[in-house]
Every structure is written in structure tokens, then in C-alpha cells.
Image: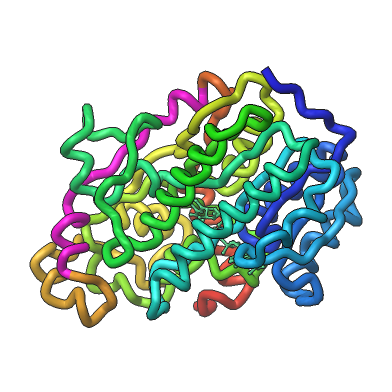
């Protein structure tokens, strides 16, 4: 039972991000003082939307510069905080050469640096870590090994590595390190939020989140010849922000919470978009046969191993714990997808047709 004071500041790392934007908005709405870290507070595109929120909401925003790879850089932003939300971590699936530099080092060393700062900061009582369902499973085929093919909070990703599904691996080793550091002391608690693929409108057009690039492929023709038979757990970004706030301020919150509304195939996602936008965009109409995807995989940036282990296996996640203990209820992800796609059009990230 930990009560977090609402008159003390709370820290949010990675404040410029897609998820963090909605989290900061929810915290400012509650009238809290938010210490928000970004790598470059002078970069207007990272902070403009946050400053606009702070101007119109009751809470107060204080921006700080901090880098995951710079030991000690979270000490000053954390001063006086009882609650730390650690959201910062690169979320990229493609476009990098060295997975260790692009993903693993910032995720793992970053978590260590933030938690080292927590260990030095006597006021902190609770850390809410933004993990992912990626820390509960590695490939869709792993669902054959769990009851009813459904992953829950007792499951861990055991099949990812630096060379296979490195983003999923980065989230797994970062969360494991966080639990290890939490168990080594008894002042602060750890609550992990494990969201599925986050969708829904972004407060910033500047995020590089793979949530945005995933949705862009529905508009750019990538899936026009068919969608690989792949499922994603999905959740609206506003529900993810709400889950963080509940995890922070619910005295009994503990352990891990899967945050997922439902699972849809890529074809289902395309169908939901077509229902709203009609046929103006090249949304997929059929499944791409696994063999065809397997043949072209290396050309379109996937390994054949990935195809073998992820295509044709439905994915499901159990959200009961979040409903029961955090009081979560979930928005309609089809509507969230439609709103998000419309926003990508409005922001020029998907070509207007
Ligand atoms: P995002 O918009 O790309 O945000 C990631 C944030 O991490 C950025 O604000 C970035 O800050 C920060 N960051 C990256 N490298 C950094 C470094 N070296 N030092 C300091 N900050 C660094 O992605 P997002 O989707 O909001 O993801 C936020 C969190 O949610 C991540 O932990 C991600 O793994 C997790 N998550 C996301 C999803 C999803 O579907 N989106 C699902 C499950 C979990 P700068 O702007 O300063 O570079």
C-alpha cells in the first residue's frame, strides 16, 4: 500500500514520445507538477505540444535535459519526486544497422541509469516502467506453448535475441533488469505496464514510434497485394496513458499489467480502415500466402526465420488483471485506428487521396 502525494512533482522520462504525450496530458489534467525529460529541450518539435498542453491545463510542466546513455543525467529532474514514470526507450523495428547501439544499449543502460538515480533519490516511492507485451512473448508461434494460446503476466519472452526480434529483446532485458534492481532494495516499488501495439491519435507529428510507421504502411501501398497473416494485440494510446496514471496512484498496484484491448489481424485492421475511408487508400483486401511472403521476405526487410515463426499464428493477451486491479476499461481500437489514420493524413504523414 503506497500512497503517492499529488502535491509533489512526478517525473516522466522520454517526454517527447507518442505515449508520454498523452501521459503528461493526463497528469497535467490532474493538476500535477510534471518534471519531463527530453534529450534536447531546445528542439521545438519535441516540446511544443507539451508546452501548449501546460498552457491550457491546471498542472505545471518543467522540462529537463536527460539522456538514457548519460549516467547521472536523471538526478536533477528526479529531485523531490515520489513517482517516476520511465517511458523513454527507442521503439524502432527497422532502419538500423546495429541493434545493440540502436535498441539494446539505450533500453538496458537507460533503465539502469534511471534506476541508479532512483536509488540515489530518497523521495522516490514508486517507479512505473513502460515495458511491453514484447517482454511476455517473442514470436507468435510461442502462443502454442501457453494455455488457450493467451499470454498473461506470468509469461516471459524467451525466444528473442540481439539478432532475432531485437526490439522485443530490448524490452525484455530492460524489464528484467528493472525487477532485479527493485529486488535489491526495499524503499521503492516497481509497477510495469506492458502495452500491446499502441494506436490512436498522437499529440505530436514528430514521434518516430513504430506505432506510426506501422499505420503508415496501410496508406503507402505496402499491403496492397495482401496482408501477411499476422496478428497484433492493440490498445488505444489514451488507455495506455490512463493505465500509467492508475499504476502510479493506485496504492495496491503491483507487478506487471498487460494493457491490451483486443487482437486484430492486419487484414482486420485494413477492414476497419476501409469501413471508414472507403477504397481511396490501398488497404489490404486479402491475405498474402505465407509461402509468397517467405520468398520475398529478405527483399522487404524481414528474415525468413521471422516469417516462419510469426505468420499464421493468432496472438492473444489476457487483460483481466488490468481490469480487476487497475479498474481499466478499453476503448474501441477500430475507432482509434480510424482516428489515428485520419490524423496521419492531416499531418501529411500519409498522402491525402
Ligand atoms: P516514441 O514516440 O519513439 O518515444 C520514445 C521516446 O524515447 C522518445 O521520446 C525519445 O526521446 C526517447 N528516447 C529514445 N532514446 C533515448 C535516449 N538515448 N535518451 C533519452 N530518451 C530517449 O515511442 P512510443 O511509442 O511513445 O514508446 C514509448 C515507450 O512505450 C517505449 O518504452 C516503448 O518501448 C513502449 N511501448 C510502445 C508501444 C507502442 O506500440 N507504441 C507498445 C508497447 C510499449 P527523444 O525525443 O528525446 O529522442
Region rendered in magenta? 304-323
Residue at 51 percent of width and 19 percent of height: 324
Residue 283, percent across and down?
Answer: 35, 66
Residue 95, percent across and down?
Answer: 41, 78
* Above or below 126: residue 285: below
Residue 166, percent across and down?
Answer: 35, 62
Whether residue 193 is visible to the viewer of this picture, yes or no, is no
* Above or below 123: residue 266: below
State which quarter of the image contains the N terminus. top right
Q: Quadrant of residue 44?
A: bottom right
Q: Nearer the viewer, residue 279 or 171?
A: 171
* Above or below 298: residue 189: above
Q: Is residue 288 magenta?
A: no
Q: Ligand 1 appears in which quadrant?
A: bottom right
Q: Nearer the viewer, residue 101 or 346?
A: 101
Q: Nearer the viewer, residue 301 or 128?
A: 128
Whether residue 101 is visible to the viewer of this picture, yes or no, is yes
Amino acid at each position: 500500500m503506497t500512497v503517492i502525494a499529488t502535491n509533489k512533482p512526478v517525473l516522466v522520462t522520454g517526454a517527447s514520445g507518442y505515449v508520454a504525450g498523452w501521459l503528461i496530458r493526463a497528469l497535467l489534467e490532474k493538476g500535477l507538477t510534471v518534471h519531463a525529460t527530453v534529450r534536447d529541450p531546445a528542439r521545438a518539435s519535441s516540446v511544443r505540444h507539451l508546452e501548449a498542453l501546460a498552457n491550457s491545463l491546471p498542472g505545471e510542466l518543467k522540462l529537463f535535459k536527460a539522456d538514457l546513455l548519460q549516467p547521472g543525467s536523471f538526478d536533477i529532474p528526479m529531485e523531490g519526486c515520489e513517482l517516476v514514470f520511465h517511458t523513454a526507450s527507442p521503439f524502432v523495428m527497422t532502419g538500423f544497422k546495429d541493434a545493440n547501439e540502436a535498441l539494446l544499449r539505450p533500453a538496458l543502460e537507460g533503465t539502469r541509469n534511471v534506476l541508479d538515480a532512483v536509488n540515489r533519490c530518497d523521495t522516490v516511492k514508486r517507479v512505473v516502467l513502460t515495458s511491453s507485451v514484447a517482454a511476455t512473448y517473442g514470436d507468435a508461434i510461442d502462443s502454442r506453448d501457453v494455455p488457450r494460446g493467451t499470454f498473461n503476466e506470468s509469461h516471459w519472452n524467451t525466444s528473442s535475441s540481439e539478432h532475432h526480434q531485437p526490439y522485443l529483446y530490448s524490452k525484455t532485458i530492460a524489464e528484467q533488469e528493472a525487477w532485479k534492481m527493485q529486488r535489491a532494495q526495499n524503499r521503492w516499488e516497481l509497477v510495469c505496464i506492458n502495452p500491446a501495439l499502441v494506436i490512436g491519435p498522437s499529440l505530436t507529428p514528430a514521434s518516430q514510434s513504430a506505432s506510426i510507421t506501422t499505420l503508415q504502411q496501410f496508406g503507402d501501398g505496402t499491403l496492397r497485394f495482401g496482408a501477411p497473416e499476422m496478428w497484433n494485440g492493440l490498445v488505444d494510446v489514451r488507455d495506455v496513458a490512463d493505465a500509467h496514471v492508475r499504476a502510479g496512484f493506485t496504492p495496491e498496484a503491483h507487478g506487471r499489467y498487460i494493457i491490451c484491448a483486443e487482437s486484430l489481424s492486419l487484414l482486420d485492421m485494413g477492414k476497419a480502415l476501409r469501413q471508414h475511408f472507403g477504397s481511396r487508400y490501398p488497404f489490404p483486401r486479402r491475405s498474402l500466402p505465407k509461402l509468397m511472403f517467405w520468398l520475398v521476405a529478405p527483399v522487404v526487410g524481414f528474415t525468413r526465420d521471422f516469417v516462419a515463426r510469426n505468420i499464421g499464428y493468432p496472438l492473444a493477451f489476457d487483460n483481466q488483471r488490468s481490469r480487476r486491479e487497475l479498474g481499466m476499461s478499453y476503448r474501441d481500437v477500430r475507432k482509434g485506428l480510424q482516428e489515428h489514420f485520419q490524423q496521419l493524413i492531416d499531418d501529411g504523414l500519409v498522402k491525402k487521396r
